[in-house]
Image: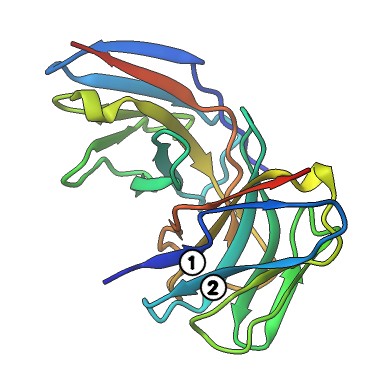
Amino acid sequence: NAGVTQTPKFRILKIGQSMTLQCAQDMNHNYMYWYRQDPGMGLKLIYYSVGAGITDKGEVPNGYNVSRSTTEDFPLRLELAAPSQTSVYFCASNGRNINQPQHFGDGTRLSIL
Amino acid sequence: DAKTTQPTSMDCAEGRAANLPCNHSTISGNEYVYWYRQIHSQGPQYIIHGLKNNETNEMASLIITEDRKSSTLILPHATLRDTAVYYCIVRIPTSGAGSYQLTFGKGTKLSVIP
């Protein structure tokens, strides 16, 4: 059971480039989340999804887009990369039971130069 | 929103019990307390959660005070691999039923010493 899988693990982008961070889970979880973690700081919620076709903004959504066409996948898109988006990005998911814990992937380390 | 307060850092001798405290004095009656840890910038790892009863699993024990204003995570026999940042979290529900935001503070950096 792979859990939450994120790709790529590392990426360097130039300012203005775009890319998609991939997230997949094999636990049949309805709820999926994207967080970012800046150095020495806690996690901040970017976007979340309560099921296929439904997404909503979190605390820091500007500069990002998401889609949820299937239960398994929840990609995060950066359209015009900016240095302020240099961070570690974590994807998480949890099941339908409201008290189930969120399970996290290993993260994508993104640097924008 | 309930906030949590944790010590910035703690040391523990290898093989001894590590007791990590957390204050959450504004927690509401139906909110769970979750504990996660993060090792070397890996993804946060779920440890345990509880509402008002003490909980135990294969990783740790969670002791919640009767008034629910504080809790303690106990790692019974700390190993070097337990060196990590430990986060005590009271989650914030988002608009979708069953979904919630985890607000990670700065946590407690636990150093297990040989």
| Colouring convention used in this rendered image of the protein | rainbow
Percent x, y of residue B21: 40, 22
Image quadrant in which you'd find residue B97: bottom right
Check the image and report above or below for A90 versus B80: below
Taking the image as shown, residue A59 lies to the left or right of residue B66, namely right
Check the image and report above or below for B4 versus B114: below
Can residue A96 be seen at all in this image of the molecule? yes
Q: Chain of mark 2?
A: A
Q: Nearer the viewer, residue B39 or B89?
A: B39
Identify the residue shown where x is 87% and y is 58%.
A16
Spatial separation of the CA atoms under disc 1 and disc 2 = 5 Å
Check the image and report above or below for A64 versus B61: below
Identify the residue shown where x is 62% and y is 60%.
A34
Percent x, y of residue B102: 57, 50
SS for tag 1? strand
Can residue B98 be seen at all in this image of the molecule? no
Disc tally is 2
The label number, if any, that marks residue A93 in the structure image: 1
| In contact (CB < 8 Å): disc 1 and disc 2 | yes
Q: Chain of mark 1?
A: A
- The disc, 1 or 2, on the residue closer to the chain's N-terminal end is 2
Q: Quadrant of the C terminus of chain B?
A: top left
Check the image and report above or below for A85 versus A5: above
Percent x, y of residue A110: 65, 49
Residue identified by numbered label 2: A31
Q: Quadrant of the N terminus of chain B?
A: top right
